[in-house]
Image (cartoon, grey):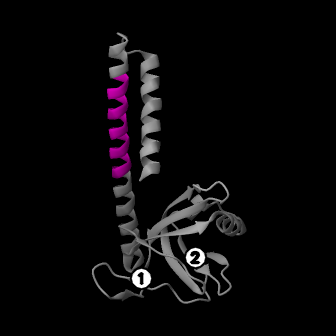
Amino acid sequence: MAQSVTIEKGQHLKMVVEYVEEMPSKNPAWDSRWKVDGLAANGVGVTTFIGNKAMLQQTGRLKMTPENLRGKTCIFERTVEGYLNILVDGGKPKTPPVELPVAGGDEVVREEAAPSEVLEKVAQMREERRLRVSEDITWAFEKAHDLITLAMQSHEMQMGPEALRAMVALAATIHISYKDAR
């Protein structure tokens, strides 16, 4: 499980970005934010959230999209004034790093993992995520199949192209609803 990290004013978080997703706000008066998952020092899994405006300003400055951060080593830095900077390609932060506790102990992680170890761990995290997504989609199709079959039996209908399209649409709806509820 990834460690949730809040980057306070005057701190930075360096990570190999594995996953980026825009998270809409449940409050219509608030803007969305970006969930960023990855691996920090010594392969510690971390998750942080970046406001939409800051993310788009910084990735725009870098001539990128938020999704382009995947697979890159990035430094997410909060200045002492609270502004966000995103540094890539070996940029040097002006603030100290966030201290990350190691799971199961009081030890604090300060050193960088060897690049090959980090890349191996990123590949492992991606494979685990793919497996979870595959399992979730399979589950959603099974639920959709059961519901469509029940509806067709109650109306004495045969499986046809319309029922298959309805099953795919229902499976997508179930999967999205389940994903958003997690």
Q: How many marks?
A: 2
48 lies above or below 8: above
Q: Looking at the rendering, which quadrant does residue 167 occupy?
A: top left
Label 2 neighbour load within 10 Å: few <14, some 14-19, many 20+: many
Residue at the location (47% across, 30% down)? 169
Q: Percent x, y for residue 58?
A: 68, 69
Q: Nearer the viewer, residue 106 or 94?
A: 106
Q: Which mark is residue 100?
A: 1
The amino acid marked with disc number 2 is Phe
Q: Residue at left 39%, top 69%?
A: 2
Above or below, comparing residue 151 to residue 48 in the picture? above
Callout 2 touching callout 1 (CB < 8 Å): no
| Numbered disc 1: secondary structure | strand
Where's the N terminus, which quadrant? bottom left
Kindly report the distance in space between the C-alpha atoms of the residues bearing marks 2 and 1: 15 Å
Instruction: Tell me which residue sits at (54%, 90%) in the image.
Output: 96
In the rendered structure, the answer to whether residue 180 lies left or right of residue 151 reads right
In the rendered view, tell whether residue 9 sits above or below residue 169. below
Mark 2 / mark 1, whichever is N-terminal = 2
Q: Amino acid at mark 1?
A: Leu
Q: Which x, y percent locates residue 84?
A: 65, 76
Q: Mark on residue 76? A: 2
SS under mark 2: strand
Q: Which secondary structure is most common in the magenta stretch?
A: helix
Q: Which residues are magenta?
A: 131-149
How far across and how far down the image is residue 87, in percent? 61, 76
Question: Few, some or many C-alpha atoms within 10 Å of disc 1 (few <14, some 14-19, many ≥20)?
Answer: many
